Image (tube, grey):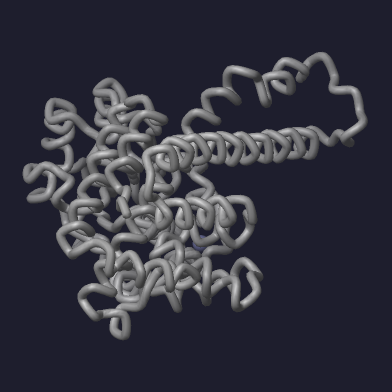
Amino acid sequence: MSVWDSLVGQKPVIDMLSELAKGDPRHLAQSWLFCGPPGSGRSNMALAFAAALECPRHGCGECDVCRAVMSRNHPDVTVLATDKVTIPIEEVREIVEKSEEIPTVAPWHIILIEDVDRMLERTTNVLLKEIEEPAEHTMWLLCAPSAQDVLPTIRSRTRLVNLAVPQTAEVARFLVERCGTEEKLAQRCARLSEGHIGISRLYAVDDQALADRDELVVGVLGLRRVSQAVLLADTLMSNAKSQASASVNREVERDKAEFLRVNGLKPKDVVPAAIRGAWNAIGKKDDVKRRTTRLTRDVLDRSLNSIASVYRDVAVVQAGAVDSVGLVNLENRRAIYDLATRIDRNGAVKRLESIELARRRLNGNGNAQLDFEALFCSLIVFD
Ligand SMILES: [Zn+2]
């Protein structure tokens, strides 16, 4: 066991970081930029590095220090995560101030910022001086999808760590060994997730998510009329909402069970008055609503990846590259080959561009249903 175990397909990076964590701390860079596409595990990598730096055994994965860091509960490891579009400047100011403090129990005061790309330039400026000359015992671990997503001023002041997109075989092995997924299903989920660990795991455990994906891909491949496009947008929206709502309900049930366990109660016990406020707060209506809305966005964003994978496959067929790079949507092989003859290469490229446009509109908090109607209309191949 070690803190690096949960990371998939990143051996070269792990070898480098674990060596550095064991080495002389005086030679360590103090500002880092961890880059990797969504699902590659960039913030988990940064967190594992933090544990390796704080743990007396350099990331054993078993001691209290490792456990506290990995569960984001270590007093000297501060994680700044956001589900907002941009990180508020006040939060960064606060964290910069905190960064001057010396660590309380561990060798380093570590500050991990997920999604440092979600910062406006003026917010970034608050950070610059600190990451250029960090306090003596402070370590900055910044994360972003790619170095291009980060302002050059940040890039030039940090040491870059690039994560790889995990290979399908590695993701499949992870599912079999760590999640107990059956081999054939693991292969399929790994292929469909295109190297995104979290999504592969979701497909492996959530039949509905996988079935919804199938339905979407079949729908996209069959788009020949406007009425179908409108209907498909409708189906996608309602599937996304019910998937999100089911998943939030599962989270609430888990939180309730955990609350009871921590307080030594059984499911049928009456919750004592002193903790009833906290109990009632779990699964509160507006909280559930907020989480469901956010998760629906995630499902829709993932749908865009699935849709893009169809045209990626079409382009692969058109380029005669199936033998070398393979298809994502193997189950829809025949329809993909058929589509590859009905549109030309330019047609595939234009559709991929429409998908990126839809992604930008969706991120700009547009009307999702209308965005998808427009997208599906632009994907139609008329007979
Ligand atoms: Zn440890």
Say whether residue 126 is left or right of residue 362. left
> Which sits in the foreground, 130 or 8?
8
Considering depth in this image, is 19 or 354 the residue closer to the camera?
354
* Quadrant of the rendering where the C terminus is positioned: bottom left
Say left or right for 196 vs 316: right
Q: Look at the image and tell me in which quarter the N terminus lies.
A: bottom right
Choose between 196 and 269: the one closer to the eye.
Answer: 196
Q: Residue drawn 28% across and 64% down? A: 342
**Quadrant assignment, res 15:** bottom left
Q: Position of residue 136 (x, y in %)?
A: 22, 45
- In the rendering, at what x and y percent does residue 242 appear? 60, 36
Is residue 116 depicted above or below 120 in this figure? below
The x, y position of residue 165, in whole percent, is 32, 66
Q: Residue furthest front?
A: 383
Look at the picture and state if 85 lies above or below 218: above
The answer to whether any part of residue 20 appears in the image is no
Q: Position of residue 105 (x, y in %)?
A: 45, 45
333 is higher (above) or lower (below) than 61: below
**Count of residue discs:** 0
